[in-house]
Image (spheres, rainbow, N blue to C red):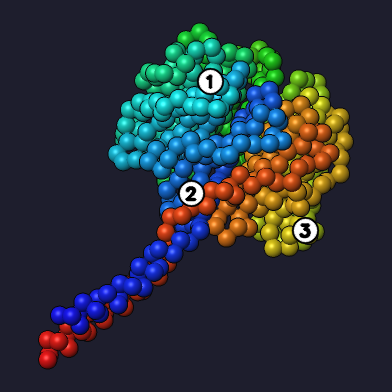
């Protein structure tokens, strides 16, 4: 018996040694670990950053950082929500010293929608408020609307035995309680990817839908729809307006003008002879829209348009898109209007064409734009000579409403963001960029950089995750060691039995 005890102890020692040695992995579970998909919200001099941190093979926490000096300095990261309630990427908003955040927690049998609020510039947050989702699944939260004590949350989910729907959950007591969700898409069928912009106490909502089309059996045409929400007056919704077939629809608002851009092609509308980037506008707050016009037209068989972006400020409107042409190479392009979208100037090439393009996957990725009047800022990822083994961040701007573009700046040595899913925001001459960098042994770190001079110079990256090392033990060799141990015990027993 003593021999058996010694053998068991000898086989357990390697497991104990492996178990107590801490692998300082930032929760390192391949292939996903570290920070992903940040969200930025600004309010005067305050900058708020939220992001999810993945660890433990899918477990995640919701982290929060704040700055009160336009991003020059940040306090220590705060774990806003732990693993038991974290989930989707958050929707965020900030105004008048208040900070709002909402997210989905994925649990069975019913996903949970949560909300938190800070009334002291992010120094402290309320307890979680759980919002009824009425049994929906596969949810995603997109935006938060605020006017006085009224708070609305727009989210997407699938009701029991149903199709994707876009819901509005509302509160009239500063987010302490929420009513039952209202289906904004009940008349248009399978709907997804809502985009919302708030201007004053009114919200403008752009929806995508394939109606009742069965995408598993047929090619479904994506249709764009538009509606409004009066937040202040009981969240009254306007009529649903059909904007016709439109892929990658994008929304922008400036005062009483509403702009929509997207991609039209023979795939979405047989009456259209060629693919192109289409633009339409409303001058009456979205009550009616003018006939769409194509800003650029291509041969439908040889061009691939994607990753469209639209933004506006004052009378300036900017449309940015990628053109993946297998013949001439990939290009990042922009067209601008200085007269409220009535006319657009010549198309400007921001990046490309790539002389080494081979017709396959392009080099430029994930463009982000931000605008302020006649100032236009754009960042994107592409291969860089400063980092031959990875992607770098590039920056370009216009200070004359898009008529001309400044030189391209490779920010790779300043902004060490190598993964897509980053975010940019601007506030006057202040620019903020935050995103994930994978060049760490323990997974992605969330890094931040800012410019206070309109993009002339940027600060070196600040590593938000430098002190968030996990002491969660890892056991990379537990299975092999355990198998050896069990095998040894079986062999020992057989020998003993034979003896």
Q: Residue 330: tell me if it is visible.
A: no
Q: Is residue 35 left or right of residue 168?
A: right
Question: Which mark lies nearer to you, 3 or 1?
Answer: 1
Choose the circle earlier in sequence order: 2 or 3.
Answer: 2
Residue denoted by label 3: 386
Q: Is residue 127 left or right of residue 254?
A: left
The residue at 12%/91% (across/down) is 499
Mark 3: which secondary structure? loop
Mark 1: which secondary structure? loop
- Where does residue 106 sit, x and y in percent of width and height? 38, 40
**Contact? badges 2 and 1 (CB < 8 Å):** no
Q: CA distance from mark 2 to mark 3?
A: 29 Å
The quadrant where residue 464 appears: top right
Which quadrant of the figure contains the N terminus?
bottom left
How many marks can you see?
3
- Where does residue 11 sit, x and y in percent of width and height? 30, 76
Choose the circle earlier in sequence order: 3 or 1.
Answer: 1
Q: Residue 127: tell me if it is visible.
A: yes
How many residues crowd mark 1 within 10 Å: few (<14), some (14–19), many (20+)? some
Residue denoted by label 1: 119
The residue at 40%/68% (across/down) is 18
The residue at the far front in this view is 2
Q: CA distance from mark 3 to mark 1?
A: 43 Å
- Where does residue 108 sit, x and y in percent of width and height? 31, 41
Residue denoted by label 2: 54
- The numbered dot on residue 78 is none
The residue at the far bottom in this view is 499
The residue at 62%/14% (across/down) is 200
**Contact? badges 3 and 1 (CB < 8 Å):** no
The quadrant where residue 273 appears: top right
How many residues crowd mark 2 within 10 Å: few (<14), some (14–19), many (20+)? many
């Amino acid at each position: 018996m003593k021999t058996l005890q010694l053998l068991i102890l000898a086989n357990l020692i390697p497991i104990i040694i492996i178990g107590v040695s801490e692998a300082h992995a930032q929760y390192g579970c391949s292939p996903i670990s570290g920070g992903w998909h940040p969200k930025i919200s600004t309010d005067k001099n305050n900058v708020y950053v939220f992001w999810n941190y993945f660890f433990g093979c899918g477990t995640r926490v919701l982290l929060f950082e704040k700055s009160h000096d336009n991003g020059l300095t940040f306090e220590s990261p705060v774990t806003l929500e732990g693993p038991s309630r974290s989930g989707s990427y958050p929707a965020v908003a900030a105004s008048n010293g208040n900070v709002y955040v909402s997210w989905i927690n994925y649990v069975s049998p019913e996903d949970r929608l949560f909300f938190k609020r800070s009334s002291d510039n992010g120094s402290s947050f309320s307890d979680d408020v759980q919002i009824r989702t009425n049994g929906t699944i596969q949810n995603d939260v997109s935006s938060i609307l605020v006017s006085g004590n009224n708070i609305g949350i727009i989210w997407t989910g699938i009701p029991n035995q149903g199709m994707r729907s876009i819901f509005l959950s509302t509160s009239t007591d500063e987010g302490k309680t929420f009513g039952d969700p209202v289906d904004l898409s009940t008349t248009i069928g399978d709907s997804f990817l809502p985009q919302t912009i708030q201007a004053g106490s009114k919200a403008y909502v752009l929806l995508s839908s394939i109606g009742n089309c069965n995408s598993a059996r047929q090619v479904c045409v994506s249709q764009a729809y538009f509606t409004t929400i009066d937040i202040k007056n009981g969240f009254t919704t306007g009529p649903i307006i059909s904007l016709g077939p439109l892929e990658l629809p994008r929304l922008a608002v400036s005062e009483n003008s509403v702009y929509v851009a997207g991609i039209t092609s023979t795939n979405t509308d047989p009456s259209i002879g060629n693919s192109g980037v289409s633009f339409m506008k409303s001058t009456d707050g979205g009550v009616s829209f003018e006939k769409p016009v194509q800003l650029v037209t291509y041969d439908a068989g040889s061009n691939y348009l994607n990753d469209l972006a639209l933004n506006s400020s004052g009378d300036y409107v900017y449309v940015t898109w990628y053109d993946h042409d297998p013949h001439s190479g990939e290009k990042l392009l922009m067209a601008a209007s200085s007269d409220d979208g009535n006319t657009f100037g010549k198309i400007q090439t921001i990046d490309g064409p790539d002389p080494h393009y081979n017709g396959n996957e392009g080099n430029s990725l994930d463009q982000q734009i931000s605008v302020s009047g006649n100032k236009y800022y754009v960042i994107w990822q592409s291969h860089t000579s400063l980092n031959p083994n990875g992607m770098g961040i590039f920056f370009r701007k216009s200070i004359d409403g898009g008529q001309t573009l400044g030189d391209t700046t490779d920010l790779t040595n300043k902004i060490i963001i190598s993964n897509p899913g980053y975010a940019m925001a601007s506030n006057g001459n202040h620019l903020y960029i935050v995103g994930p960098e994978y060049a760490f042994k323990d997974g992605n770190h969330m890094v931040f950089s800012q410019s206070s001079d309109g993009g002339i110079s940027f600060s070196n990256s600040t590593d938000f995750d430098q002190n968030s090392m996990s002491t969660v033990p890892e056991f990379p060799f537990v299975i092999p060691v355990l198998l050896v141990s069990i095998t040894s015990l079986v062999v020992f027993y057989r020998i003993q039995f034979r003896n």
